Image: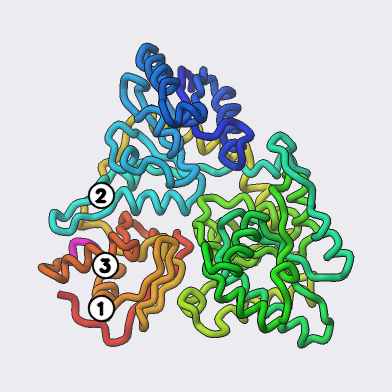
C-alpha cells in the first residue's frame, strides 16, 4: 500500500491528545509507504482568522497540485478545504471528535470512509449518518453501516509510561503536595471545563461526611484545573457563569471555603500529570463533555489510580468492568434526586478502606491497556480501513425495512417507567405518548413500524432528540454495544 496522501489535520504533532495521535498517524502512514503532504490548522495564524489571505494562498496551491491518491481529514480539518476529487481520488475522515464541520461530512458522497477512534464514536457517527426519514422510509446515508470503521486508538503512555515532555506544562502544585503530606485524601478531576459541578460537589460532600463519620477527621480534597477554580470563585461571589447551588450547600454544611475542598492546578506537564495520578487516591470524571476516546481516565488507571465516572462518552466503554473505571449513573443522579450520589461516595470510601481492591483493578486495567491500545493495533486497523477504502468494493446497504430500532448509543440510562432518559446528547423526560412509542418500537424492525400523522411525527422526534437510532440487522448487533438494555414494559400494547 503506497501512493501520495494529503493530510488535513487541525492539530500539528504534539498538540494535545489529537496531536499525539496525528504524530503516530503520520509515522505509521510513512511506514506503509505513503508520501505525505500534511496541512494543519484551519486558520493559519491570528490575522488570517480575520482576513484569510494566507488561507486563499494555501487553497490556490492545493488546486494547482495534481490530485493525491488519498486524503485524510479530521473533523475540524475539513474546514481547511472540503473533500473533492480534484484534491484526492479517495477521501477519508478521521474523527478525533464530532465538533467540526458537520455540514461537510454528514452524507457527503465524496467521503469514501469514516474512521472513528473508538467503538463509541463509530456507533454515534452511524446513528447520525443513518438518521431516518420515516415519511419517505429511508436513511440519510445508509452507506454508514459499512463505511464507518473503528480503528484502535494508540495510547502514547503504552510506549512512554513516564510521559512525554514536548507539550510542556507545570509541576504538581505545592498545595497538593502539602495536602498529601498533611494526610488529606487527595483525588483528581483536572480536565479543564468538563466537570459536572453539581455531581462533583455532591460526591465531595458525601465523602467528607463519611470520613467524619469514621472518626478519622481527614479532609477529602480534589485537584482541579485553575481556570475552573477561578470560575467557581466568580460564581460563588456573583452567581455566574456556573450553577453553584450544590457547591454552596456543600461548603455551608462542611463549614469550609472553596480552597478547603479544591486545590487549583495549572496545566501540568505529562510527567507531572502522571505523578499526580500515582499520588492520588481516586479520580472523578463526572463530566458534561462526552469523551470521544478518553486519554485521561485510561492514563489514570494505567498509573494505578481508579476513576469514578458517570460514563459519559467512551468512558463507559474503554475498559471492561472491574478494570479500574467505575462507571455509575442513574436517572436519580442526572435528574437531581436527593442523596443520589451517595452510592458513588460509598464505593470510593470502601476503596480507601481496602485499597488492595482498586489497586488490583488498576493492574488489570493496565494490562488490558498495554495489550489493546498499542501502536501496532492502530497501524493494523488503519491499514485495513485504508485498504477497503481504496478497493471501493462496498457491500450493498441493508434495506430500510430490515433495520432495527434501538436506544441511541448516546443514551447512558433509561427509566422505562418514568420516561427519564440520561444521555450524552440531552437528558430529558419523555411524556406518556412518547414513552408509549418507545415501548412499541424498541427492538422491532423498521418494516414492522407503520405510524401516521402526529404519532409518526413523535416517532421522528425521538430520533432527532437522540433517544432512538437504527442499527443494521444481524445476530448480536444490540449486544455488541455497551449501552442500556432495551426494556420491555409489562402489558405492552399490541403492535399496530
Q: Nearer the viewer, mark 1 or mark 3?
A: 1
Q: Report the Cα–Cα distance between label 1 and label 2.
A: 27 Å
What residue do we see at 74% from left, 62% from top? 263
Range of the magenta residues? Answer: 444-449
What residue do we see at 68% from left, 37% from top? 167
Element under disc 1:
helix
Residue 230 covered by magenta stretch: no
Question: Where does the image place residue 233, in percent across and percent down from the top left?
Answer: 63, 64
Element under disc 2:
loop
Q: Which residue is mark 1?
A: 436
With 414 as the anchor, is 274 left or right in this view? right
With 298 as the anchor, is 90 left or right in this view? left
Question: Where does the image place residue 315, in percent across and percent down from the top left?
Answer: 56, 59
Mark 1 / mark 3, whichever is N-terminal: 1
Element under disc 3:
loop
Which mark, by number, is residue 462?
none
- Above or below 370: residue 453: below
Q: Are marks 1 and 2 in contact (CB under 8 Å)?
A: no
Given residues 327 and 224, the one toward you in this image is 224
Indicate the quadrant where residue 265 lies: bottom right
- Residue 36 visible in the picture: yes
Q: Check the image and name the residue furthest to the front.
A: 238
Which mark, by number, is residue 398?
2
Q: How many marks?
A: 3
Question: Where does the image place residue 436, in percent across and percent down from the top left?
Answer: 25, 78
Q: Which residue is mark 3?
A: 444
What residue do we see at 23% from left, 57% from top? 402
Q: Nearer the viewer, mark 1 or mark 2?
A: 1
Q: Check the image and name the residue furthest to the left.
A: 453
Number of residues whose C-alpha sits closer than 10 Å to that of mark 3, classed few (under 14), some (14–19) or many (20 or more): some
Indicate the quadrant where residue 230 lies: bottom right
Question: Where does the image place residue 371, in percent across and percent down from the top left?
Answer: 66, 47
Amino acid at each position: 500500500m503506497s501512493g501520495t496522501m494529503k493530510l488535513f489535520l487541525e492539530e500539528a504533532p504534539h498538540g494535545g491528545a489529537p496531536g499525539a495521535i496525528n504524530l503516530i498517524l503520520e509515522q505509521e502512514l510513512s511506514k506503509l509507504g505513503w508520501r505525505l503532504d500534511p496541512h494543519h490548522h484551519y486558520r493559519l495564524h491570528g490575522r488570517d482568522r480575520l482576513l484569510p489571505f494566507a488561507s486563499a494562498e494555501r487553497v490556490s496551491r492545493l488546486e494547482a497540485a495534481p490530485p493525491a491518491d488519498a486524503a485524510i481529514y479530521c473533523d475540524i480539518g475539513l474546514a481547511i478545504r472540503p473533500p473533492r476529487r480534484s484534491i484526492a481520488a479517495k477521501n477519508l475522515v478521521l474523527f478525533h471528535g464530532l465538533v467540526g464541520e458537520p455540514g461537510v461530512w454528514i452524507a457527503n458522497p465524496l467521503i469514501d470512509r469514516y474512521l472513528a477512534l473508538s467503538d463509541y464514536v463509530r456507533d454515534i457517527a452511524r446513528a447520525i449518518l443513518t438518521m431516518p426519514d420515516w415519511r419517505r422510509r429511508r436513511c440519510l446515508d445508509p452507506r454508514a453501516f459499512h463505511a464507518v470503521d473503528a480503528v484502535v486508538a494508540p495510547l502514547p503512555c503504552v510506549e512512554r509510561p513516564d510521559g512525554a515532555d514536548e507539550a510542556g506544562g507545570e509541576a504538581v502544585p505545592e498545595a497538593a503536595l502539602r495536602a498529601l503530606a498533611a494526610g488529606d485524601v487527595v483525588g483528581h478531576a483536572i480536565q479543564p471545563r468538563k466537570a459536572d459541578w453539581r455531581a462533583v460537589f455532591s460526591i465531595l460532600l458525601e465523602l467528607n461526611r463519611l470520613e467524619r463519620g469514621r472518626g478519622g477527621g481527614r479532609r477529602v480534597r480534589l485537584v482541579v484545573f485553575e481556570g475552573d477554580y477561578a470560575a467557581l470563585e466568580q460564581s460563588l461571589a456573583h452567581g455566574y457563569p456556573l450553577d453553584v447551588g450544590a457547591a454552596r450547600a456543600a461548603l455551608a454544611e462542611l463549614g469550609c471555603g472553596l480552597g478547603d475542598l479544591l486545590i487549583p492546578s495549572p496545566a501540568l506537564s505529562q510527567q507531572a500529570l502522571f505523578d499526580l495520578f500515582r499520588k492520588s487516591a481516586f479520580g472523578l470524571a463526572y463530566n458534561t463533555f462526552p469523551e470521544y476516546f478518553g486519554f485521561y481516565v485510561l492514563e489514570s488507571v494505567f498509573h494505578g489510580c481508579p476513576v469514578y465516572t458517570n460514563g459519559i462518552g467512551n468512558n463507559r466503554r474503554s475498559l471492561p468492568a472491574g478494570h479500574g473505571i467505575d462507571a455509575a449513573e442513574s436517572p436519580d443522579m442526572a435528574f437531581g434526586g436527593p442523596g443520589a450520589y451517595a452510592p458513588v461516595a460509598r464505593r470510593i470510601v470502601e476503596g480507601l478502606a481496602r485499597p488492595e481492591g482498586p489497586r488490583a483493578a488498576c493492574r488489570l486495567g493496565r494490562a488490558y491497556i498495554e495489550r489493546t491500545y498499542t501502536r501496532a493495533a492502530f497501524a493494523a486497523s488503519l491499514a485495513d480501513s485504508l485498504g477497503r477504502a481504496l478497493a471501493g468494493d462496498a457491500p450493498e446497504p441493508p434495506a430500510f425495512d430490515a433495520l432495527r430500532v434501538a436506544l441511541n448509543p448516546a443514551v447512558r440510562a433509561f427509566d422505562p417507567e418514568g420516561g427519564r432518559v440520561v444521555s450524552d446528547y440531552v437528558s430529558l423526560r419523555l411524556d406518556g405518548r412518547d414513552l408509549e412509542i418507545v415501548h412499541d418500537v424498541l427492538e422491532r424492525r423498521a418494516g414492522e413500524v407503520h405510524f401516521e400523522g402526529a404519532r409518526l411525527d413523535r416517532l421522528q422526534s425521538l430520533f432527532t432528540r437522540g433517544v432512538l437510532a437504527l442499527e443494521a440487522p444481524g445476530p448480536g448487533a444490540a449486544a455488541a454495544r455497551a449501552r442500556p438494555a432495551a426494556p420491555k414494559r409489562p402489558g405492552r400494547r399490541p403492535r399496530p
